[in-house]
Amino acid sequence: MQTIPQNAIHQDTATYDDSSIDSVGKIAQQETVQQDARTDRNFDAIADHFEKKVYGGLKGEIRLAVLRRDIFEYCAQMSESLGRPLRVLDVGAGLAQIAIELATQGHTVVINDISANMLEKAKAGAEQIDEDLDITWYVCPYQGLEDRLIKDSEQEHTDNTIAKETKFDLIMSHALLEWLAEPALVMEFFDRQLMDHGVLSLCFYNPASFDYRNLIMGNFNLLDNTEYKADNKKSLTPNYPVAKEEVESWLATHDYRTVKTSGLRVFHDYAPLKRGGHNDPDAVIRMELRYSQLEPYKWLGRYLHIMATR
């Protein structure tokens, strides 16, 4: 299969300058010096482990299936209503599968992550697609993204041209909230970057699922241990997840209205004994999709997906 020509994916050349590398290095140093302080998580050191653990099996296929269903349906309706392709931002994108697929549908996509290694993997995936994709890549913390977007927009127009729109119709933030030191603050960034009537797609780890799974597995000692912390050098279980009620309160405070909610992996992770339909991946995905939007099952999802508009 042909790879995308060099000019097909717009490269943010400033991404790889020494200042960006220094910024990542400083973050790593801060994590080493301040072992007990919360910092935004960077998956640079375990990018390969992340790719294999999260998307190397049926768990990842279920996750993507639910997100595709939710997001693609809504995007198709919004694009038809607006009469144009959408402008999409994926914050903390990781491997950016959904964002890349939206680019294949003709939308303009901006992909961001703090990890250069994760975005290199995402780019490699995009380059396997034999299409011209309108993607711009930014390696930086989300806190530094706004200035980069404004700067690049200003460079792309002169006094004789119309400034490029810098706001977005859809902002996706998937598995980011639980890895931020101050997750509530990202809502202010979303407010500034989202178009009026735009849509916010938040997918986040469900702390209730941690308790429920360990109840099923009989790990009562772990649940009794109030000091328990996962080893986040390798573990992908967040130590500071945000509850559904907390996210809903942020959305209400910032005047968002929820339009869609789903659970990701509402039963698959709770079945230690695989029997019957559990041995058929297609059947598992079909049933996960069926129950992902039904009460009360969706609230058991290992991850929750909320789409909201202002």
Image (cartoon, grey):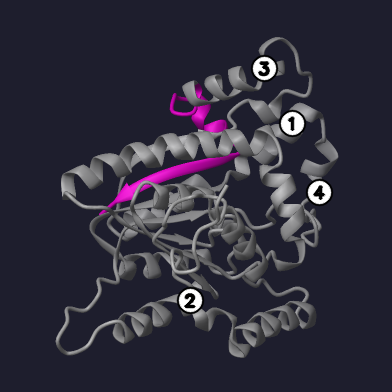
Marks 2 & 4, CB-CB < 8 Å contact: no
Work out whether mark 2 precedes mark 4 in sequence or the reverse, and give the earlier one. 2
Name the residue rendered at 21%, 52% in the picture.
Answer: 84
Q: Amino acid at mark 2?
A: Asp
Left or right relative to 282: residue 31: right
Mark 1 = which residue? 215
Residue where numbered disc 4 is placed: 225
Residue 244 horizontal/vertical position (percent): 49, 45
Q: Within the magenta stretch, is there residue 293? A: yes
Residue 280's disc is 3
Q: Which mark is in front, 3 or 4? A: 3
Q: Nearer the viewer, residue 238 or 229?
A: 238
Q: Residue at x 33, y 68 (%)?
A: 193
| Of the image marks 2 and 3, the number of the one nearer the N terminus | 2
- Label 2 vs 1, first from the N-terminus: 2
User: In screen coordinates, is 142 left or right of 163?
Assistant: right
Task: Return the residue at label 2.
Answer: 12
Q: Are marks 3 and 4 in contact (CB under 8 Å)?
A: no
| Residue in the foreground of this view, choosing between 166 and 204 | 166
Type of amino acid at the residue the image marks with label 4 = Asn
Q: Which residues are magenta?
A: 291-310
Q: Quadrant of the C terminus?
A: bottom left
Residue type of the residue flagged with mark 3: Asp
Q: Label 1 to label 4, Cα distance in Å?
A: 13 Å
Element assignment for label 2? loop
Report the residue that reaches farthest toward the top: 276
Give the image location of residue 69, x and y in percent: 42, 34
